[in-house]
Image (spheres, rainbow, N blue to C red):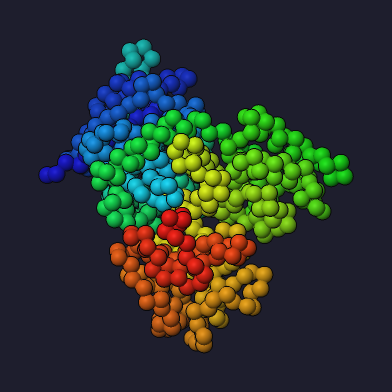
Amino acid sequence: MTPFRLKLVYTGGTIGCVGDPLAPLPADKFEAAFSDFLLPIIQERYPNIEITYHAFAPSLDSTNLRPSDWAKIAATVIGEPGDTATYGEADGFLILHGTDTMAWSAAALSFLLTGLDQQGRVNAQISKPVILTGSQSPIFFEDPDSGALTLRYNTDAIRNVLGSIECIRAGIAQVGLFFNDDLMRGNRALKTNVTEFDAFTSPNYPLVAEMGIELTVRNRLLIAPPINPEISIDTPSTLAKLQAQLEHLKGALDDVTMVDFLAYPASYRASQNSSTLADALQGALDGVDGADGLYLENFGEGNFPSGNPDDPKAGAVFRVLKAAHDRGTVIASGTQVISGMVNSTAYASGAWLAECGCVSTYDMSGPAVQTKLTYLLALGHAGYFNWPQETVENLMRTPIAGEMTPINRLDDARGRFLVAGQSIAAFDGSATLINDPDLGPVLIDPGQPDAPLWAALANPTAMPGRLQIQGDGDLVFYDRSNGVLWQSETQSSRNGSAVLILSGSLKSDDLALYLFDESTQAVLKTLYGKAPSVAALG
């Protein structure tokens, strides 16, 4: 029987704590106890399992983790530069982690285990499961007199470990977070409860799998596997590229200065151009001698007090943000609300943010925004990719590891089709491709919706219909009876590798709507405008 090879990475956390107050077990003692108490239970389900251990000594306290610690954990999965054994000697990776910052580590690992090239395109991707879990209650009890350990049964730890292994054995090849019988995409998870076993939820993305009597996997919600062997880190040269990138990040992540700022109702005097929020924000930025990145946790759909409701651009907050952006700070505009899509343009009280350079974070979670921005800024540092501010801002709007709903593209993560009323849009909102219930697919300037820039159909019939990318790369519009009304007559080189992209802006006269083959990095067909060169894509 072929062995099932599991690598268990113990970082610390409640799951491995004992005593009063709780403190983590030493690495060797935890490993011995796991082998004595948990391994026999696991082997009942998987007789062929082989577990290798990696324990951090001293343990990585979840509360005090630094960004460079995320890179250390990632290295336990892919190894150091030149190491071809670490990733190859396991079929899956189980990371035991403290719950305080598990959502940040899960999000960070999804990015750190994804390679990017100079243009920000994915050029390396994992092909095996990496699951993080922990517990709200420790897994062992230590006798205060003898120091002997026993297994605790009134805890969520055992079930979390067993459920995580079930997901790994199913081959769910992505970074996931498993808790209380639920497998979440790692960069979509949030800790939303501190006292109950259902500590984590996934507010903006459905559960990937659920553990009951059997494991139920929602295949359609999984991240697509590497588009070709050259992208998979099973390929030695691709693994080497990702290892080299991670080695850079180990030294660069802690150098990124990030400020997180929470909106709150505060005093202002518009007539005097004064604002408590503006002063606090300026103080936060000055406290780190400027900032590489700023994350605004706004109200509602993305509204932030400007300091002057009648003329936001005259407000004190606008001036602070505009000055920070002009100095090179990348500003991510999000929300304090845990669920829903950020749309700063929905209200006048948020629309002004774009004018001072703020980038919307759409449906990304707070931990995903913070870790993604830190990751991109570290890659963009001088001496590596040397990305300008605009490149980082565009990549913040672009899905890298399934952390957000695609805004300007139609692909696997979006379900590969648009039903009536659904749309994709240019990053700056200057153009929208909408599946109009009466007209079918039309590209419009939202300010002049009655004068389409491009339309698929000259004489729409049997409406409404759906716009769908076929597995073979053909973009097809079907009527309500499933009849073909229009098709692009394109074909990609690999099944499932085609994507429809709306890039550029009407304002800068470089708007383009085109089909792209991610496997060959080739433009299949341009529907509107002029598609950018391959070197500029991403």
Q: Nearer the viewer, residue 376 or 126?
A: 376
Residue 241 appears at what percent x and percent y?
A: 33, 41
Q: Which of the 4 image quarters holds residue 135?
A: top left
Q: Is residue 316 left or right of residue 203?
A: right
Determine the residue positioned at 34% across, 64% down: 496
Q: Nearer the viewer, residue 529 or 355?
A: 529
Whether 17 is drawn above or below 415: the answer is above
Number of marks drawn? 0
Q: Nearer the viewer, residue 136 or 314?
A: 314
Determine the residue positioned at 39% across, 57% down: 221
Whether 185 is drawn above or below 424: the answer is above
Residue 218 appears at what percent x and percent y?
A: 36, 57
Determine the residue positioned at 50% across, 82% down: 457
Residue 154 appears at what percent x and percent y?
A: 39, 33
Residue 518 appears at what percent x and percent y?
A: 37, 59
Q: Nearer the viewer, residue 135 or 322?
A: 322
Question: Is any atom of residue 6 visible in this view?
Answer: no
Task: State the residue lying farthest toward the left.
Answer: 1
Whether 28 is drawn above or below 110: the answer is above
Determine the residue positioned at 49% across, 37% down: 381
Question: Is any atom of residue 118 visible in this view?
Answer: yes
Q: Is residue 371 left or right of residue 175?
A: right
Q: Is residue 505 left or right of residue 1?
A: right
Q: Is residue 64 left or right of residue 260?
A: left
Task: State the residue lying farthest toward the right.
Answer: 271
- Where the N terminus falls, by quadrant? top left
